[in-house]
Image (spheres, rainbow, N blue to C red):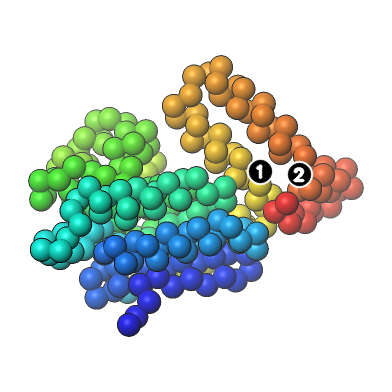
Amino acid sequence: MTDFILSHLEQGVMTITLNRPEVFNSFNQHMGRAFQQALDAAAQNDNVRCVVITGSGRAFCAGQDLKEVTLETSPGFKVIVEETYNRSIRLICNMEKPVIAAVNGVAAGAGANIALACDFVVAKHSAKFIQAFAKIGLVPDSGGTFWLPRLVGMARAKALTMLGAPLSSAEAESMGLIHLASREDEFDNNVNQLSQTLANMPTRGLGMTKKALHAGLINSLEEQLSLELELQFQAAQTSDYAEGVAAFLEKRTPKFKGQ
C-alpha cells in the first residue's frame, strides 16, 4: 500500500509530503496518524531545523475524505476532528521550529487551515484557498476561525467562511493571509531558499519567537512582557546567542547550529 505520508530530510529541512494524490491528498484517520507521527518525529529530531509541508500531485490538501465520514463504520465527526485535525494543528503550532506550507495546488477545507497554521505559506499562483465548509453545511475547523479573523480581519473572515468562494494565492498574499504567491517556475526555488534560510538561523531563538507571537494573540500586555522576559533569558543561554555575538564582534557571518 502506498505510504500516505512521505518524509525526507536534507540539509536540516524535513519535507513532509501528503501523499494521496488520487483523492487530492484528503485525510482519513490512517493518514492523520501518519502525519502526526511525521510532525512529532521532526519536532524531536535535533537535526531538523525547518519543516516543509506540501502535497503530491495537483493538490495541496482537499481536507477530509468524505467517504470515511459516510461509512457505517465511521468514528463520527467529533472523533475525526479531534484526532485527525486538532492534534495535527497543535503539533504544527507548538513545534518550536519554523514550519512552511508549500501550497502546490488547491487547499480546501481543513487543508486550507492546516496551511494557515504554518508559520509561512508559499503558494503557486495557480493554487486556490477554499473555506469549503459552508457549501456542505459545516463549520470551519482546524483552527480556521482562530487564524482567519486575526490574519485578515472579521469582515473578510466572514466572507471567506460563509460564502466559500475560492481565493487565489495572489489575493491571499495581498490581504496578508499568506507569505508569498509564487510563479510556477519559481515555486520550488522560492520554497528551497526560504527553508534553507530558516534552517541556517538560530533554531531555538526562532522557536521561542514563534511561541511568544502565538501567546501574544491571547495574552494581556503584562502577561506578554513577562513571557518575553523569560524567553529572552532562555535565549541568552543558548550557544547560538554566544555565536551571534561573537560573529558580530569579529565582523564575520555567524554559523548557527540550532543549539
194 to 204, vertically: above or below: below
Q: Amino acid at mark 2?
A: Thr
242 to 111, vertically: above or below: above
Q: Amino acid at mark 1?
A: Gly
Residue at point 62%, 45% (across, down): 206
Foreground of the two, 211 or 85: 85
Q: List x then y, in percent, for residue 258.
A: 70, 54
- Which residue is the site of mark 2? 238
Left or right, 14 with reference to 30: right
Considering the numbered disc 1 on the image, is that residue within a helix, a strand or a loop?
helix
Residue 205, disc: 1
Residue at point 48%, 59% (across, down): 39
Left or right, 136 with reference to 52: left
Quarter of the picture holding the N terminus: bottom left
Residue lying at the far bottom in this picture: please name it.
1
Considering the numbered disc 2 on the image, is that residue within a helix, a strand or a loop?
loop
* Residue 53 appears anywhere in the view: no
Q: In which quarter of the view is residue 229 placed?
A: top right
Q: Are marks 1 and 2 in contact (CB under 8 Å)?
A: yes
Q: How many marks?
A: 2
* Residue 26 appears anywhere in the view: yes
Left or right, 160 with reference to 47: left
